[in-house]
Image: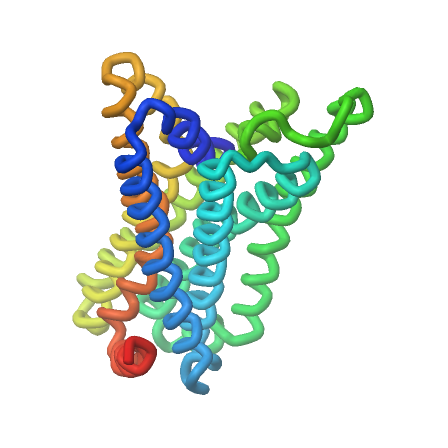
Amino acid sequence: MSLTNQTLTNVTANLQYLGVLEIVLFFTLSTMSCCIFLFINGIMLFTLRSKALFCETSRYILLYNLLFADTVQMALSQLLYITATSRITLTYPVCGFLTMLANLTTVVSPLTLVVMSLERYVAVCYPLRHATIITITNTGVSIIAIWAIGSLNILTRVLLLLEFPFEALDSLQMKDFCSDIAMFVGSMSDDYDKAFTCVLFISASVAITCSYIGVIVAARSASTDKASAHKACNTLLLHLVQLGLYLSSTIHYPLFTALARVLKRIVFVRIQVVFYVCIFLLPRCLSSLIYGIRDQSIRPVLMQHLCCQLR
């Protein structure tokens, strides 16, 4: 998780090598893209609360939780990007709060994808028991558990931060831009972050992959609804793609380190900006695009709300 916002800091630190016009273009590209994605996610969140069907169906409740976490993560990342671009340094408490909140939502997203994948698995493989297993109560408990795991991760990070002697500092004002890396004040924080990230994404990948295999096996059964199984397979594949993009936005730093050795700095900065938009911002809008286009219940309501807002 720690490497997510490092791209923002790296981009800003290297802006001095670019011309004013190019700086404006890069800033406009990232900010406009983020505003568009936030607008789409906002309309989608409003759509999921506009009808009783969406509020009383488990997979739509899980989708709302995923979109909420992605939207908060996107907004926080753009806020950190703007502060870094504007050369604004924060205090350690403020930076710590923002980065911890960003880390919380970063954990919530892949875990929600896992629960959504399991829900699709139960719907296809155990259709007669789906209504008794996937209830509103069980969905609420799952969401609480997801946020509890994320909160425990944050609590552990805070405890590791307490080892740093902040009282020895002349001032709590940071000398560098706010990012996850800046809040790593000891080797234990870095080691914990790497271990937690590996466990999280390996577990999520195994769970979604097993769900996909289970749905494929069930699709070969004569008693299974072929159309429903095929649609579930496509949904689970899209979840795997989302998880891969989440992982790419988290562990990309080693790749950037290698590219920095072989590319000119100005080219490297351009790649970082494009990466930020395509690999970090876009995946957090992907759920809105996937369900907004594919889901027959959401699509007409979403299009109606989008048209009204654009007017």
Q: Residue at x 49, y 47 (%)?
A: 79
Residue 36 on image: x %, y %: 32, 60
Say which of 109 and 117 sits in front: 109
**From what the image shows, is residue 258 above or below residue 249?**
above
* Residue 30 visible here: yes
Specify the quadrant that holds the C terminus: bottom left
**From what the image shows, is residue 128 above or below residue 261?**
below
* Residue 240 visible here: no
Q: Quadrant of residue 219?
A: bottom left
Q: Residue at x 18, y 71 (%)?
A: 227
Q: Residue at x 36, y 44 (%)?
A: 280
Q: Residue at x 34, y 37 (%)?
A: 248
Residue 183 on image: x %, y %: 61, 30
**From what the image shows, is residue 309 above or below residue 237?**
below
Q: Does 100 sit left or right of 245 as displayed?
A: right
Residue 28 on image: x %, y %: 32, 47
Say which of 29 and 137 sits in front: 29
Say which of 31 and 74 sits in front: 31
